[in-house]
Image (cartoon, helix red, strand yellow):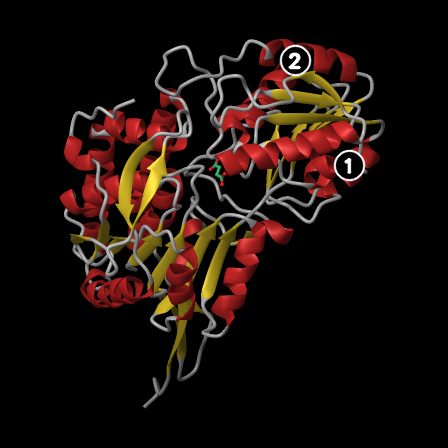
Amino acid sequence: MKLELNDSSLLKTKAFINGQWVDGDTGESFSVLNPATGAVVAEVASVGQAETARAIAAADAAMQSWKALPAGQRSEVLERWHGLIIDNIDDLAAIMTIEQGKPVFESKGEVLYGASYLKWFAEEGKRIYGDILPSAGDRRSIVIKQPVGVVAAITPWNFPNAMITRKAAPALAAGCAIVLKPAGETPLSALALAELASRAGLPAGLFSVLPSARSSSVGGEMTSNPTVKKLTFTGSTPVGKLLMKQCADTVKRTSMELGGNAPVIIFDDADLDLAVKGALVSKYRNSGQTCICANRLLVQEGIYDAFVEKFAAAVKEFRLGFGFDADTTHGPVVSAKALGDIDTIVQSAVKQGANVVTGGKPSALGHCFYEPTILTNVDDSMNIFSEEIFGPVAPVFKFSTEEQAISMANDTEFGLAAYVFTENVGRIWRVSEGIEYGMVGVNETAISSEVIPFGGVKESGQGREGSKYGLDDYLETKYICMGGLQR
Ligand code: SIN
């Protein structure tokens, strides 16, 4: 399958450092694969520690004049970047589909979602307010907000565009520079974004993109270099913990958007059709590969059989296929490793007694396709209750009481997103307040947008992305005491 673009110059295969397209010092490269076919899409330059250090130094130099600009001027650049992304949506979506696998309609949705963060923070960046605190006598106490400094970002493959703009937009709006390592599976979307940022007039050095097959050498420099003042990461909890430990030596600020184990709690009194629709969207979006995907469907016993019947009927209508085919509803998972991990979880559940309602194995389409799967007869003693599945597999657990549902929902080290379906207003509040999650969807599972604070509690991370709260992650609070006023 050949990638056809309206603007072929958006397909970049070199690193973007200090405004230049460069090869790595060693000349190494790595292959980007199409998960739907296994074919090599591109060979991309691989950088390491030395190039990362140069990008960080360039970022530090570039942000000195960037942070001194009026916020409105930074905003204009972000607005232009946003406009160019919209203008090139078809190409960006095609690049995403070929390297990540999601159907083109989902890729386009992600490009719009990603662009929305640029627009949002172009506006929010103009509203970085300080404060005057109650003070009297010969002094006044003032609070100002300043950019945190050079930001390093490590982003995942599941949203190759939006997870980048969700970090770059607030960082740049706040007056910071950002150096970014995209996932090895999906560097092409990141590099295309860099090209558009450059066309938008973003000065050199403010946004460098460091593709690498040697993640630990790039990550090691990002976490140890004292010029980097903040690390922002989206990815797994074990890697997040490691990065936090590495950042401790230079006491960097961190934002961590880590793993999830989202429950969708469906009570007997729920609107069944709404709950089925919500569970479908949440579970199978991006073929189950989002941190906020439903990981556990918890369904009350009175509605359980009816729910499974309707849910399974809808899943059997899915059209698994190549992302570029018009009738494809769901694509492959990202890699052969991901496919293997998903199948291991499913087979282990089956061995422990789970029933396969539909799916349950790799698809006959081959490569990285896994059949959309539903499992029943599952319980909290099984691995599938506690592990993040990150694939198109829905285990449907049964519960009896509200207390039991809350306790099952909280029985995990994760706390990113949870969902509740009920028509009872009192229960909405009891459950929303009783579950330990950073985000709760009530009768709704499509909860993400640039307007809301995205983030988790417990081992799902810290910090918030998007919304009016998202800028704080890139700002320092400075207290200025003005004394001697009675002289
Ligand atoms: C994620 O999986 O981390 C992001 C999902 C979203 O933004 O909705």
Percent position (x, y) of residue 110? 38, 31
Secondary element under disc 1, as helix, strand or loop, is: loop
Q: Which mark is residue 155?
A: none
Of discs 1 and 2, which sits in the foreground?
A: 1
Q: In this orientation, which residue lies closer to the viewer: 290 or 367?
A: 367
Which residue occupies the foreground of this view, 393 or 481? 393
With respect to residue 28, does 2 lie above or below? above
At 41% from the left edge and 55% from the top edge, which residue is drawn? 215
For the residue marked with disc 1, what is the amino acid? Met
Above-or-below relation of 138 to 437: below
In the image, what residue occupies the spot 37% across and 12% down? 326
| In-image side of 178 versus 462 (left or right) | left
Say what amino acid the circle numbered 2 marks. Ala
Residue assigned mark 1: 382
Circle 2 packing at 10 Å, graded few (<14), some (14-19), many (20+), is some
Q: Position of residue 356 (x, y in %)?
A: 71, 19
- Image coordinates of residue 427 in percent, x first then y, are 74, 30
Q: Position of residue 37 (x, y in %)?
A: 39, 25
Give the structural element (helix, strand or loop) at label 2. Answer: helix
Residue at 52% across / 33% down in the picture?
Answer: 289
Residue 423 visible at all:
no
| Residue carrying label 2 | 312
